Amino acid sequence: MKQSFFKQILFLVAGFFLLTISAEAGSLCHGNFVNPITDVCWSCLFPISIGSIETTSGHLKDTPNPSLPVCACGTTVIRPGLSAGFWEPFAMVDVTRTPYCMVNLGGLQMPFGSPASEGTASSSGGSDNVSFYYVHWYKYPLLYWLQILTDGVCLETGDMDIAYLTELDPTWNDDELTFILNPEAFLFGNLIAQSACAADSVASSFSLPMDSLFWCAGAQGSMYPMNGRVQEHVGGVQAATLLTERMDYKLHREMLITDSVGENSPALCYTHRLSVLPKSRYRYQMVNPVPTTGSNGCHPFGATTTTWEAGHEIPFVGEDFGFLVFRKRNCCFL
């Protein structure tokens, strides 16, 4: 009788202990659901241009646009149109230390059984300051949902979808496997190549990033390796921004993202797959833990975060991050 009573007490204590651990594990996942109206920096869509003429100006420098305002698409039936240029919000990104923590979905913890381990965001000791995060990429065709532009040819279409979970990618936490994806990385792991990134940092912070220095992530560091390891962790905002840019590059390398680059009619009528990231055609806005929705809410890839990161990393509840990524679109608006 006493032995049975002792077993019951032991089971109750063990159950309470397991529930406590589960609650603590769940509390590691924090985030806010992104409001598609109030949490978006709408001024980041600008400038909007027709041909080379800006119809609406913006606070950031624009990429080159077609010189002619008219264009034509089609093979058997030629359809004339206007060559439009604008910045489209097309993807959302989670950067988190907790596996399957969906930051931009309100801190939802996905109930997946996986051997994925917790990420880190602190010094590994000695002179190294290394961190590791997981990244989730969402398809987020906001303009298509809101019907702000009626021509679906010029927009990312479809529904919101979780397009990529790095917890399921064996290359995300293994430098050797990542080398298969970016074998050219050994060419840029030297002082000369990395010193050139200083020029990209300045260009990104004051104008547009330099696409010719494709291995550089401006003030954030290096695009290589294309995984979740940040070799020089300065702060959470800096590391999360770097991994957002790396993830964009990784998806380009895997031919999962298309872009509209070029001034002639074929380039305006169809999107293209590029294995190298055209950095100048992307900008980002933070949406978690603190949405940046003001007139200077978005920033070019590679721009320094020191001018705005203060107050955007909150201890414990705001150490995982969410971003909205804008892509430049040039297309023949029919």
Image: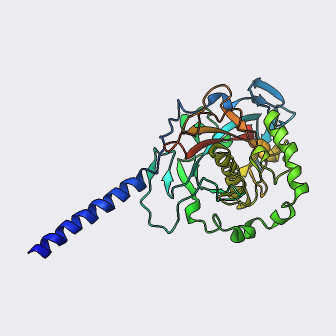
Can residue 238 be seen? yes
Foreground pick, 73 / 19: 19
From the top left corner, tell me how far across and down residue 279 is, in percent: 78, 46
Left or right of residue 68: residue 146:
left
Q: Is residue 124 above or below residue 75?
A: below
From the top left corner, tell me how far across and down residue 87 is, in percent: 70, 36
Quadrant location of the C terminus in the rendered image: top right
Can residue 78 be seen? no
From the top left corner, tell me how far across and down residue 43 is, in percent: 66, 27
Q: Is residue 41 above or below residue 95?
A: above
Q: Residue furthest front?
A: 126
Foreground pick, 149 / 101: 101
Foreground pick, 97 / 272: 97
Identify the image quadrant of residue 1.
bottom left
Left or right of residue 281: residue 233:
left
From the top left corner, tell me how far across and down residue 198 is, in percent: 86, 45
Identify the image quadrant of residue 78.
top right
Q: What residue lies at 51% left-to-right and 39% top-to-bottom?
A: 34
Q: What residue lies at 49% left-to-right and 57% top-to-bottom?
A: 100
Q: What residue lies at 83% left-to-right and 66% top-to-bottom?
A: 186
